[in-house]
Image (cartoon, helix red, strand yellow):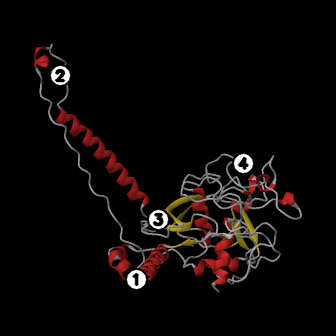
Amino acid sequence: MRGFSLSASALRLLPATLLAVWLCPSLVGCEDGETQQPEEAKPDAAAESAPAAEPVPDAGEASAAEAGAEGEEAAAQEEEKAVRAAAPDGTPMLDCGEGPDEMRCIPGGAFIRGSDEGPENTQPRADVWVQTFWMDANEVTYAEYKACEKAGKCPHSGPQYMDFDRPKQPVNGVSWFDARAYCEAQGKRLPTEAEWEKAARGTDGRLYPWGDEVATCELAIIKGEEEGRGCGVKKKGSKPDTGRVWEIGSRPPNQFGLYDMAGNSFEWVADWYTRSYAECGEPCLGLDPMGPCEGEDECPGYKHKVVRGGSWYWGADRATTIFRRAHVPRNQPFHHFGFRCAASLEQSSRIVMVRDAEDELANAN
């Protein structure tokens, strides 16, 4: 589902609309804090007999000056926030509202996408806007996907390597269609490529989820220069040196609280692949770009979807926030790709509402 935008006239009706269709919780302001004035000190006898001191500013005057400075700083911050609060077309960037426990909110706004110095398919660099959304903190696990299969909501799929079926390992070997089916079964969706890069890269153009320091096995599950594939963990069975994925969340999260945005498992995103952002043109620009054909199942002239984030099998050069890889959505020939899900504000609030209702019903019984 594409992120939504609001005109200035629609914005005036925003609270009533959101209550009516459960788009997202109301925007909440901040309460004004109170500043307590210090009590005037009472002089004692020693103070009365002491030599006269240099005159000092009255406590009330000092407090007023400090309050004035704080007020100016707060006003400057509010002004800066107001500048960042709307996309160039006037669409307001909305508050996070409520979301599922397993997801993290990615605040709306501009981010630096691509690179003029990177591979051709990452060019050109551009400022791109995305609306506030939610993203799974972790890659979907083998156990989670198999539970969806058992419930009859997901196609049979998964790894074809031995030692890739541990419950907390990211599920591997699924097609783009399998990944989409899982996300939809959870009331979510696959992230767009722009959303994925914003979630991995933040707003400062960092080359890796943690900054610009080159990926190592201390930071991500990759093919280490000394350790080898899977940071040196051998796969059981034949070809042990090909390594394997680790359990999710084995390395520190990024600034948004997301794990394994570099390494461990490549991740499917919603978009069709283009050889460069320049070739993509308008579908890859503006607010909430979704790429050619807005990611629909059929897109004449396009045969590949996109995977992002690198993996245990490849080195640091593929674990960057800009690296893009193309593959056929049916995953034939077979590759060990995984995924994570995203959710719009409408989807995230609906998930919370449904889960709360289910909990109330369970407790009532």
Q: Which mark is residue 88?
A: 3
Q: CA distance from mark 3 to mark 4?
A: 38 Å
Disc nearest the viewer among 3 and 1: 1
Disc nearest the viewer among 1 and 4: 1
- Residue at coordinates 57% horizontally, 78% vertically from top-left? 186
From the viewer's perspective, is residue 210 above or below residue 285? above
Residue matched to label 1:
364
- Residue 126 seen from this side: no
Q: CA distance from mark 4 to mark 2?
A: 60 Å
Residue at the farthest right position: 238
Q: Amino acid at mark 3?
A: Pro
In the displayed structure image, the side of residue 232 where residue 190 appears, left or right = left
SS at mark 2 in the image:
loop
Q: Residues within 10 Å of mark 1 (few under 14, many from 20)?
A: few
Q: Amino acid at mark 4?
A: Thr
Q: Quadrant of the C terminus?
A: bottom left
Please tell me which residue lies in front, 80 or 269: 269
Q: Amino acid at mark 2?
A: Pro
- Residue at coordinates 58% horizontally, 54% vertically from top-left? 254
Residue matched to label 4:
216
Q: Earlier in the sequence, mark 2 or mark 3?
A: 2
Disc nearest the viewer among 3 and 4: 4
From the viewer's perspective, is residue 71 above or below residue 194? above
Total marks in image: 4
Please tell me which residue lies in front, 151 or 220: 151
